[in-house]
Image (cartoon, rainbow, N blue to C red):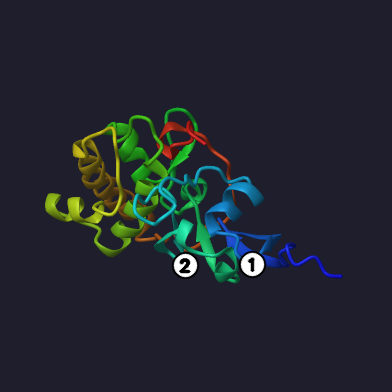
Amino acid sequence: MTDMTTEQLLDVTVNVNGVPRTASVPARRLLSDFLRHDLQLTGTHVGCEHGVCGACTVLVDGKPMRSCLMFAVTAQDHRVTTVEGLCDAPDARPCATGERMNPVQQAFAECHGLQCGFCTPGFLTTVTAYLEENPAPTQDEAREAISGNLCRCTGYQNIVKSVLRAAEIRTERLGEDGGEAGYAAAPAARHTSSSANGGERA
């Protein structure tokens, strides 16, 4: 007799941070759980589990998505970039500690755009995608860009400063690189834990 309580497992292959990753998961496995538990990419944080707080935001084909609202199977054959993959983008550079940071990560570090760090990965991915669409935001536009992400610590002032500073850094680096950019796919996965990744809270 078949055990009806045993959920069928599906082989799911997702391009995560530029690397095809495959795991056998239940059909209802959330993308956030797939990343954290199956792939051990704990930089993606889970807060509300209802798509409200934005902490679990990742980039799917370059667009910000709440990973707690997506099934892993729906990401099949798509490109997912987590906070761990931002440091592999074309405009990432080594920082003072030797770790690579993209413009948003560097700006959050410079402007103290984080405190406990739990919400930071969601802000980093959200802002990274936003600057692809609007590379020179005003202060009001920066506030609007982060309005879907919640932070209990900072009061948002330094986060807004971080968005504006990230735009400046990004423009400088694009000038150096002749306009090369893009975060839809990263060449390789790194497992960094710098403060600008929000990696101190798993």
SS under mark 1:
loop
Where residue 1 appears, x then y in whole percent? 87, 70
**Left or right placement of residue 44 versus residue 104 in this view:** right
Front tag of 1 and 2: 1
Q: How many marks?
A: 2
Q: Callout 2 environment at 10 Å: few (<14), some (14 to 19), or many (20+)?
A: some
The answer to whether any part of residue 115 appears in the image is yes
Nearer the observer, 56 or 105: 56
Q: Which mark is residue 37?
A: none
Residue type highlighted by circle 2: Asp
**Left or right placement of residue 8 versus residue 185 in this view:** right
Task: State which tag comes first along the sequence, 1 or 2.
Answer: 1
Q: Residue at x 60, y 55 (%)?
A: 34
Q: Callout 1 environment at 10 Å: few (<14), some (14 to 19), or many (20+)?
A: some
The answer to whether any part of residue 39 appears in the image is no
Q: Residue at x 49, y 64 (%)?
A: 70
Give residue 134's quadrant in the image. Answer: bottom left
Q: Residue at x 58, y 63 (%)?
A: 72
**Left or right placement of residue 66 versus residue 25 in this view:** left
The residue that disc 1 covers is: 27
The residue that disc 2 covers is: 61
Nearer the observer, 106 or 199: 199
Where residue 177 appears, x then y in whole percent? 38, 55
Where residue 56 appears, x then y in whole percent? 44, 51
Nearer the observer, 177 or 87: 87
Where residue 85 appears, x then y in whole percent? 51, 50
Give residue 175's quadrant in the image. Answer: bottom left
Residue type highlighted by circle 1: Ala
SS under mark 2:
loop
